[in-house]
Image: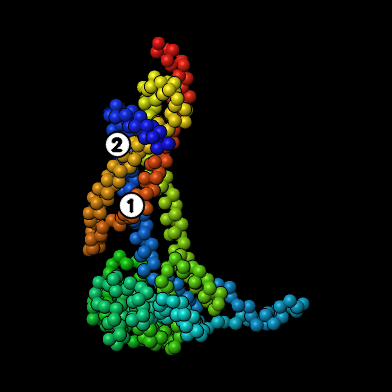
Amino acid sequence: MLARVRLILGIAVKHLAKRKRQTAVAIAGVGIGVGFFLAVSAMMIGSQNDFVQRLISSAPHIIISDEIRSPRPQPAIRALRGTTVEIQGYKTRNEVRGIKDWQEIVQAAEAIPGSIVAPSLSGAVTLRVGGREEPLGIIGVDPSIEEKIENVQDNMSAGTFHDLETTQGGVIITEDLAQRLGVRMGDTVGATSAAGTRSLKIVGLFARGRGQFGNNGYVLLREAQSLTGHPFIINRIGVSIPDPYAAQTVAANLEDRFGYKAQSWQERSADFMTLLLTRNVIMYSVISAMLLVASFGIYTAVSNSVVDKRRDIAILRSIGFSQSDLQRVFVAEGIILAIIGVVAGWAIGTLLMQILGSIRFPILGRVEHLPLDRSARQFMIAGLSSLCAAAIAAWLPARKAARVDPVEILRGAA
């Protein structure tokens, strides 16, 4: 059996060696196709992974808010449910904002191994400097905990997140807001809310281009409670877990248990994730077409080999080669071309990735590089796809070769 395999491979190699130009063209086609497949997929998948990583790291994996997806029924309705009594003229009971018994929710979330839980309070104030006014959404946090679940410090151009703890009435705002108010680091601004007016000192600035912060600012949790007039109240709990992709399951369990709306990062970014899925379908369709076009070179090479070797095919049939043996010879030619082309394509793809990775893009005062996916998975996808396409492309003319009638060919040659 092994000797037969060696014989088939030897014949295939000799056929390819005698047609050097056509062999080189077929290999080049596969190599270029695989190389560009790797370059394009590295850019697309790399940018996707970078985007998803930013989604995961820019906010807690799970956010529990003081909202309820399905409002609780009124007490009278609950008491008389299923009876023939109809209640009319009742007033809907207003729920007090804030998460009730939030300490219990925090304890339940902290019971998850490796989790980090950060309670916070959000509200709104109006900043005043001279005759200028700007609305500001404030988020009261504990910096020592919040920095573990959000990459706040990495987005700051001035000051540190921990300056909130060392400065009375400290606030961190965006550079855009500071420019509109005409203030700088260390300046004092007036903050007006329903609870009154007080002064805040700017201790940090978020860099431009950080859209996730919008028109929000960070203060200490107790400062936010004082500004909004809600002492000892929180309306948001951020939860970070070791496995971000398990956030949806954990969020559902917490919501079922406590009733408050618990959103995972997947739910908050559902539109973006759907867009990424659609983009991936388009990407793989386009770059797969590259490999399909490259396989036509193998089809042409094997087809010409079948035409040129008709007399050899007849001789091989006459000395005992079966139809399946002949098919294996020409399929082997296609696979050999594909293997050499894939190896060349891996080298071309690696070179293209190096070139793309060295390109720099200045964005808002920062220098960014293209995020590339250089994982072995992409190399395996490109290699296996090329081999499958090559096998099919070679099998079509190989089937034709196996059906050749040796008697007619030899009679015609005589």
On the image, the x and y values in percent for residue 380 come to 37, 49
Q: Is residue 334 at all visible to an observer of this figure?
A: no
Q: What is the number of callouts on the image? A: 2
Q: How is the image coloured?
A: rainbow
Label 2 and label 1: CA atoms lie apart by 21 Å
Q: Are marks 2 and 1 in contact (CB under 8 Å)?
A: no
Residue indicated by mark 2? 28
- Assess disc 2: are there few (<14), some (14-19) or many (≥20) residues with their C-alpha within 10 Å of its C-alpha: many
Q: Residues within 10 Å of mark 1 (few under 14, many from 20)?
A: many
Judging depth in this view, the residue of 208 and 256 nearest the camera is 256
Which residue corresponds to the image point at 46% horizontal and 62% vertical from the top-left?
270
Residue holding disc 1: 42
| Residue drawn at point x = 43 percent, y = 36 percent | 1
Q: Amino acid at mark 2?
A: Ala
Q: Is residue 54 above or below residue 201?
A: above
Percent from the top left, x then y, of residue 127? Answer: 33, 79
Which quadrant does the C terminus fall into? top left
257 lies above or below 400: below
Q: Amino acid at mark 1?
A: Ala
Indicate which label's residue lies in the foreground, 2 or 1.
2
Using residue 367 as the reference point, say whether residue 230 is left or right of it.
right
Element type at marker 1? helix
* Residue drawn at the location 42% of the way across and 12% of the way down: 412
> Which residue in the rendered view is the most extreme toward the right?
84
SS for callout 2: helix
